[in-house]
Image (cartoon, grey):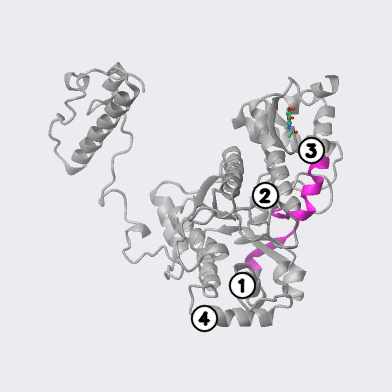
Amino acid sequence: MAGGGSTPEAAEPGKKGAAPPRPSARRARDALVFTLGVAAAVLALALLGGPASPSLLALAPGRAGLVLFPVPGPADGPPTFYDDPELSYAVGGGLAGWDAKRAAWLRSRGLRRRGGPERVVMVSGSQPEPCRGPAGDHLLLRFLKNKLDYCRLHGVELLYNNALLEPSMAAYWAKIPAVRAAMLAHPEAEWVWWVDADAVFTDMDFSLPLARYAAYNLVLYGWPKEVYERRRWLGLNAGVFLLRNCQWSLDLLDAWARMGPASPDHAAWGRTIKAALSDRDSDVACDQSALAYLLLTGRERWGSKTYLGVDFYFQGYFAEIVGKLGGVAARYEAAEREAAGPGVRRRHAEREHLAYAAARNAAVRAAGVPGPDGGGQSGWRRPFVTHFTGCNPCGGRRNPMYSRELCDGGMHRALGFTDDQVLRAYGFRHAAPLNDTIVPLPFDYPAAARNR
Ligand SMILES: *[C@@H]1O[C@H](CO)[C@@H](O)[C@H](O)[C@H]1NC(C)=O
């Protein structure tokens, strides 16, 4: 806090109720906030055991000080969709005219977009109760840390939800009410990006290619031919998706949820979906089979606005990735070592990450490392997202297709691989791929490593 001017009452924080009466209701609210602010500051000082410091003077009522935000009242700002008593955050809440309502809100808050980057809110989450497996909560913490790291480096806001917003929509259905509520709570966001808890960002340098999605409202990893021709629910993955904050998306969420466990028709939908798809064994509808069914049967309405592609690892199947991570890391190191000049190897502030990320991607391409930015099924580029589908890190049943070593070793390896990319800005890396001990990096790493 910068020191402000002094007034007698401010010098005695004990007299915190002594602000003179204010003429208007608005000012009375301001005074209340000042009072609470002073009380909080006094409490903080008391906890620190420090003397009443001169910086408290900055809290004087009526002066520039602690309180930057007056508490808004019902009369503050033009009314928006939030003031509509009928507004429901629940799926199926029947919200219409969202595009106009959202635009009006943006206008009223002076946030209309003028060629700036589109805002993205990432939504992820896990169950309300503790994990069953002994290490499950620790693993979820590491998965969450990974998302926090990615979001901090890329200016994405992260909403982590562990409440069931619709109690009957548990497990893989829980994402639908969370995504819908996030759209309403974040009208400033153009995109809501759902990322399953068991997905790991394994390329901290890759940014979403949003320009590629200008004509679409939903982005999924998958193969159009598998979904639309072979009618396969495994032709796409619903664990990671990007959904534009618009009426189309709200309608999609409603249609999607109508097949889910909150609907009286859930059981019937399960049978319908199984009959319509070629590769569905279960007659209980899951989120992914329901989404495949929607695209397939509503191709014009839903499919035409859905970007379904495998141009990079928007999410990648862990079993085809984890064995390659060592080879990927070695190729990136070699590319940086051989890069002309120390450019990409310069140490830098974390907030400069994106510029260095772009330079590193260019260096890796120049070095001839095959594969697209963001990785893919062939090549040796870092996979953007490695998804541990079926490993159930929280300690549920692991899909019997996968060995414990493949899942547990793979998760550990992927988390360490990506953590090295983060730790670098702090001067460290892991001692070895599966070793949690870290070691300091020499100056001009990785060029210096050769000369050790
Ligand atoms: C991890 O690395 C440290 C530092 O190099 C080493 O002392 C330790 O033995 C390693 N731990 C394992 C389990 O390999």
Q: How far, Cα to Cα, is label 3 from label 2? A: 23 Å
Percent position of residue 73, x then y: 26, 48
How many numbered markers are drawn? Answer: 4
Q: Secondary structure at mark 1?
A: helix
Question: Could you tell me if residue 122 is visible in this image?
Answer: yes
Q: Which residue is mark 2?
A: 209
Please provide the residue range marked out in magenta.
Answer: 304-328
Question: Could you tell me if residue 312 is visible in this image?
Answer: no
Q: How far, Cα to Cα, is label 3 from label 1? A: 38 Å
Q: Which residue is mark 3?
A: 329
Residue type at mark 4 is: Asp
Q: Which quarter of the rendered picture does the N terminus lie within?
A: top left
Badge 2 density bin: few <14, some 14–19, many ≥20, Cα 10 Å: few
Q: Secondary structure at mark 4?
A: loop
Q: Which residue is mark 1?
A: 290
Q: Residue furthest front?
A: 134
Badge 4 density bin: few <14, some 14–19, many ≥20, Cα 10 Å: few
1 up-or-down from 133: above or below: above
Query: Which residue is depicted at the point 69% across and 71% down?
Result: 233
Q: Which residue is mark 4?
A: 265
**Nearer to me, 357 or 441:** 441
